Amino acid sequence: METLTREEMEKIQLERLKETVNRVYEKVLPYRQKMIEAGVSPEDIKTLADLSRLPFVTKQDLRDNYPFGLFAVPKEELIRIHASSGTTGKPTVVGYTEGDMQVWTECVSRIAAAGGAKATDVAQICFGYGMFTGALGLHYGLENIGATIVPSSTGNSEKQIMYMKDFETSLLVATPSYALRLAEVAREMGVDPKKDLSVKIALVGSELLTDAMREEMHKWWGDDVLVTSNYGMSELMGPGVSGECEYTAGMHINEDFFIPEIINPETGEVLPAGEWGELVITCIKKEALPLIRYRTKDITRLIYEPCKCGRTTCRMENLSGRSDDMLKIRGVNVFPSQIEEVVLSVEGLGPHYEIIVEREGYNDKLTVRVELAVATDSFRDLERIEKAVRGKLKIMLGLDAKVQLESPNTLARFEGKAKRVKDLRKK
Ligand code: ZN
């Protein structure tokens, strides 16, 4: 399925799309209402281009139909329920039939294999187990490949390092920020991640992996470690929507299960291949919760050129951010990932930082707190670093920022998704 020609793939996609649209029209009342309002019926879907005639689905639709209102199967057919932690209000609930679990396992197996996973690997899963789809998703996929799973979850980092050493963990699953934290803890324990541990593969997800962050991963874990990012979200299934291969040139989308589109987030208009915009995904092989044209809020672009690995599936560029995460500071659009890029490019700084946005009168004030890699009292060094960060931020964002250097080990560390932005303007 990963090496079909475009024509073969599109044939499968169209068949599955028609089937899915028919089914949700029949079985899911809110969908039928949306389609009637948009003046489109299942018979109107004759080609893949007709997909753009269908209405979008958003997280709000899931919330409005909490918990099971968008499901296309009766509750008895579900064998698993997950939920994403909503920071405000109700979480979004997702469910899986037995068939969905098989598809999910298949999808994750593919992205894990693309990232180098093998049956001989010892895979330590340092994602939080629970309602979050990340841990169990990777768990089933890697187990299906035949890897030995160490379901260590998050927390108790010293014990994590002990397992890693004693079990000779070769594959690590974590967020990029927790992977760095684990390397830091290892060093504090006198364990050198490069020499004393056996990790050769890192499957990172649930957080942006910027190029600078990938370099940082190599710095701490070793140049020979294959660090690949993968993508998914619970609403669509969990991890397994797409993942990088060993060429790390964009994430291969499992296109026989998910049709990607890129839209202009402001107008909703579909953009031509190659352009940056918001990713919209249609699930075409899901039974319980087949979301159609789901707006992910993630900003990326699609690459259809064949990949060196031989897979012909479309790739999505590593995310440049979520439209949700974008900060508007003094009228300028700022992605936290841009600030990260600057911070990680300056010598003498560690990978830990915090972004604070405040309002003084009518003016937005941006402060970037960054941790030094090594403690220093040298005023010259501190001045050089502070100036470098401020200068690069000015070039990158066109904004003046206050840069605050902190001693090593003072900023917060994260076991799951890092929370590095404090926007105090909202309060
Ligand atoms: Zn590839």
Image (cartoon, helix red, strand yellow):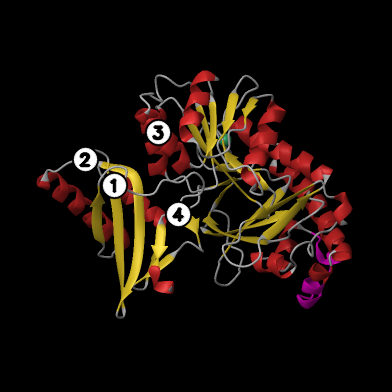
* Residue receiving disc 3: 185
Q: Earlier in the sequence, mark 2 or mark 4?
A: 2
- Residue 316 placed where, x, y %? 56, 48
Q: Check if mark 3's residue and mark 4's residue have beta carbons within 8 Å.
A: no
Residue type at numbered disc 2: Ala
Q: Label 2, label 3: how many angstroms apart (C-alpha)?
A: 17 Å
Q: Secondary structure at mark 1?
A: strand
Q: Label 1, label 2: how many angstroms apart (C-alpha)?
A: 9 Å
Along the line of sight, the residue nearer the viewer: 92 or 152: 152
Along the line of sight, the residue nearer the viewer: 207 or 159: 159
Q: Label 4, label 1: how many angstroms apart (C-alpha)?
A: 15 Å
Q: Quadrant of the N terminus?
A: top right
- Image point (24%, 41%), residue name: 348
Q: Label 2, label 4: how many angstroms apart (C-alpha)?
A: 24 Å
Ligand 1 neighbours mark 4 (CB distance < 8 Å): no
Q: Secondary structure at mark 3?
A: helix
Residue 375 numbered tag? 2
Mark 3 against mark 1, which lies toward the viewer? 3
Q: Which residues are magenta?
A: 33-46
Q: Label 3, label 1: how many angstroms apart (C-alpha)?
A: 16 Å
- Residue 99 placed where, x, y %? 82, 43
Quadrant of the rendered image containing residue 344: top left
Q: Label 3, label 4: how many angstroms apart (C-alpha)?
A: 19 Å
Q: Is residue 355 left or right of residue 110?
A: left
Residue type at numbered disc 4: Lys
Q: Earlier in the sequence, mark 3 or mark 1?
A: 3
* Residue receiving disc 4: 419
Q: Earlier in the sequence, mark 4 or mark 1?
A: 1
Ligand 1 neighbours mark 3 (CB distance < 8 Å): no
Residue type at numbered disc 1: Glu
- Image point (47%, 35%), residue name: 157
* Residue receiving disc 1: 371
